[in-house]
Image: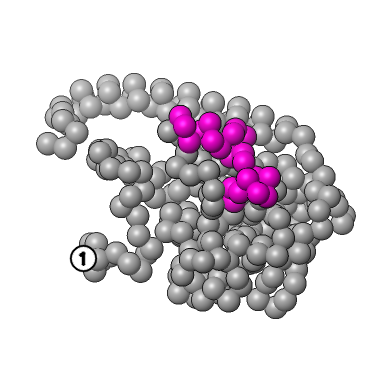
């Protein structure tokens, strides 16, 4: 039986389930405390007047807010030389795209930013069936400044607030050059934009809705003995039997 799962009577199961419930409640309390601390982070004014390429032309970081006071930016891994966007980033976006209207109800905008040219971005977005603001940072330093494209020549050698080379040497990072995932949060006050937070690596796990679901099951993520997310495909690339089962 998978994971050496045990069988029990309903009363025995209930005792074990209540024990787990106590742990779950403690985790929720810890999460609430961390969320409160996150909201207390100071903000840093964004001095660079970033210009992006959007479907209708040039847009500024301020424009991505629309009428809202908050902006969440997903740094979607899409190198200019790639034919398609990152499959793991696509997995995350699949779980986020449907909630964007709900974010707007809380005065929060969402956008994705990649270094790929806008024509590649638009073609891939159509293929995936997504509809949200997605712009190209190919003409600016946004990816380097927020440490999601590593390049020593551009002064971007840090990831997840640590030296990328040290992380790679410790086996905690697979590369010291190129595209990496991340998410950044911004706040606007009039025409001024402030950076409030950035999240990298496993800090993005809670945004992977599929993992939240799989973690509820007895088989879990089923990644033991294989690279994390090595099984992931773009949602239109799974075998037919997997897609319909």
Furthest toward the left, the residue is 1
Which span of residues is magenta-colored? 147-170
User: In the image, residue 103 lies at what x, y percent?
Assistant: 63, 56
Tag 1 residue: 241
Residue 155: which quarter of the image?
top right
> Could you tell me residue 100's position as x and y percent?
59, 60
Q: How many marks?
A: 1
Q: Quadrant of residue 51?
A: bottom right
Residue 168 in the image: x percent, y percent? 48, 36
Answer yes or no: is residue 206 visible.
Answer: no
Q: Is residue 82 magenta?
A: no
Q: Is residue 17 left or right of residue 151?
A: left
- Name the one closer to the observer, 182 or 209: 182
Residue at x 51% of width, y 76% of height: 123
* Residue 150 visible, this angle: yes
Q: Is residue 90 above or below residue 158?
A: below
**In the figure, is residue 61 to the left or right of 217?**
right
Quadrant of res 52: bottom right
In the rendered view, tell whether residue 174 sits above or below residue 12. below
In this orientation, which residue lies closer to the viewer: 164 or 66?
164
Q: Nearer the viewer, residue 4 or 112?
A: 112
**Residue 179 x, y percent position in the rendering:** 54, 53
The colour style of the image is one colour
Residue in the image at 41% along x and 23% along y: 23
Q: Is residue 206 above or below residue 29?
A: below
């Amino acid at each position: 039986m998978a994971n050496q799962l045990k069988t029990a009577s309903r009363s025995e199961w209930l005792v074990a389930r209540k024990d787990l419930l106590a742990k779950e409640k403690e985790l929720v309390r810890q999460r609430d405390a961390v969320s409160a601390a996150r909201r207390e982070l100071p903000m840093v004014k964004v001095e660079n007047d970033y210009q992006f390429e959007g479907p209708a032309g040039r847009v500024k970081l301020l424009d991505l807010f629309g009428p809202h006071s908050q902006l969440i930016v997903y740094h979607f891994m899409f190198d200019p030389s790639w034919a398609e966007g990152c499959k793991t980033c696509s997995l995350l976006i699949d779980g986020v795209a449907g909630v964007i209207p709900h974010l707007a109800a809380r005065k929060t905008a969402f956008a994705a930013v990649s270094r790929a040219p806008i024509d590649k971005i638009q073609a891939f977005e159509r293929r995936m069936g997504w509809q949200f603001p997605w712009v190209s940072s190919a003409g600016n330093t946004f990816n380097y400044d927020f440490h999601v494209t590593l390049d020593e020549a551009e002064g971007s050698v840090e990831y997840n607030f640590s030296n990328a080379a040290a992380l790679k040497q410790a086996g905690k990072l697979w590369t010291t050059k190129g595209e990496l995932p991340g998410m950044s949060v911004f706040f606007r006050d009039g025409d001024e934009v402030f950076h409030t937070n950035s999240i990298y690596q496993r800090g993005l796990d809670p945004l992977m809705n599929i993992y939240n679901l799989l973690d509820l099951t007895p088989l879990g993520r089923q990644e033991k003995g294989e690279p994390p997310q090595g099984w992931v495909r773009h949602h239109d690339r799974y075998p037919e039997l997997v897609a319909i089962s």
